[in-house]
Amino acid sequence: MSRESENTDDEPPKWMKFRSLLVFSMLLRVFLIVYGEWQDAHMEVRYTDVDYIVFSDAASLMASGESPYKRTTYRYSPLLALLLTPNSFFHRSWGKFIFSASDLLVGYFIRMILKERKVPEKICTYSVMVWLLNPFTFTIGTRGNCEPIVCAMILWIIISLMRGKLLQAAVWYGLVVHFRVYPIIYAFPIILVLNSKIFRSGQKPHLEDWNTGQVKTPTSNTEKKTFLLNLLTTLKSLFSRERIMFALISGGVFLACNAVSFYFYGQEFLHEALLYHLTRTDPRHNFSIYFYHIYLHYERQFSAVEKLISFLPQFTVQFALVFSFSQDLVFCIFLQTVAFVAFNKVITAQYFVWFYCLLPLILPWSRMKLKWEGLLCIIMWIGAQTHWLLWGYMLEFKGLNVFLPLWIASLLFLAANTFVLVRIIQRHRFSPLFKRFESSSSLKNVTKLD
């Protein structure tokens, strides 16, 4: 479809207006929380996520003046337990309302980001619907999973950067990395875009609009040379004022949060909330290709080197993506997140929310048609996941020894993730998030030509 035809029919139908969409989404989530209470009380299979019970128990311990880490398997920041302390004296569903409110806030932030880049209203609404009306996303918050809070913080960091509020972005970035470690992978692309030619004190950075920022993904030899030249320039000016400020403030907030947590909860906090995630070995079946190897060798103690070496494929892919797409910041962190999850040592369904919140932000720049290529990608991804779940059901509920087929299903799921990621890259219209400020010399040359 040409852009002219898109612009002529820009307004969505009345029932699709953002306010109506937000109200419907809110009512849906309230209904699901109430229904979940009923299902938990009357049915054998609980609606509430097991993690929510862990959060609630930890919050109850904190409310009574004890360490939340006395609750086995609580491996999160104390801030999460603190946020959920009203569960023990107000209502047990308090946390679900907090998570669902964060879920709605993510939808609002998605719209804010797209409107800042002047995406047409109709495309903007469809993109927001991908998040708000996604069955996976609206159930994960109502079942009591905390990931929507993390998603909301990450989107707010992007908004702060787009508005030139580096101090605010740095504070929230330090906080979100303390709250959930995985956003640390975004540090490098954020640092790379904090270029003195883009960010200047007292000035809001210029954004590439949806209309003007449509260029190809940099693949030609000329563009590669330009990229390498820009990379060398970036490395030379690595210690710019903006980068130093962002690093010091975000690092300071992260260390301060950890220091306060360590002061109150000591070694328990350090091990459960931080170190555990670096050296985690989980023998339980999950989507990761590593689970079978860990299961077979779990009785022997893995060395620290063996535990950390599994991060090597992740790091390799992360660096390749950052060096290729860092200027298209939102697209870059989307690719990073998908790759990070796909190559992680442990993958559970809740991790998919990490990139679901970023998907609507890249859809307006995709040349992929829903029919047939987009549909093929969706079918492949869901099909590989369903195939894995069938073997997981046979293992978990039927007690059959299907570890090998389950591991093969994990390999197929990784292949599906890789295929979809490659197709998304190929169909993406590369668009740097920020415009560079023109130098005074270039302005003089333009004036002379005029």
Image (cartoon, rainbow, N blue to C red):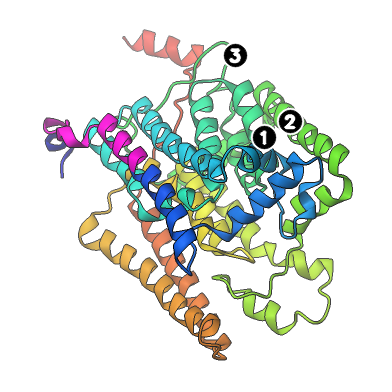
The residue most toward the bottom is 401
Residue closest to the eye, 135 or 344: 135
Specify the label residue 253 is tagged with.
2
Closer to viewer: mark 2 or mark 3: 2
Q: Main secondary structure of the magenta part?
A: helix
Q: Amino acid at mark 2?
A: Val
Location of residue 345 in the rendering, given as x and y in whole percent from the top left corner: 64, 66
Q: Amino acid at mark 3?
A: Ser
Can residue 279 be found in the magenta stretch?
no
Q: CA distance from mark 1 to mark 2?
A: 6 Å
Report which residue position mark 3 lands on: 201
Q: Earlier in the sequence, mark 1 or mark 3?
A: 1
Segment colored magenta:
7-27
Residue 274 in sight: no
Q: Earlier in the sequence, mark 1 or mark 2?
A: 1
Specify the label residue 175 is tagged with.
1
- Location of residue 365 by image quarter: top left
Residue closest to the eye, 34 or 236: 34
**Residue 308 sits above or below residue 255 on the image:** below
Can residue 10 be found in the magenta stretch?
yes
Mark 2: which secondary structure?
A: helix
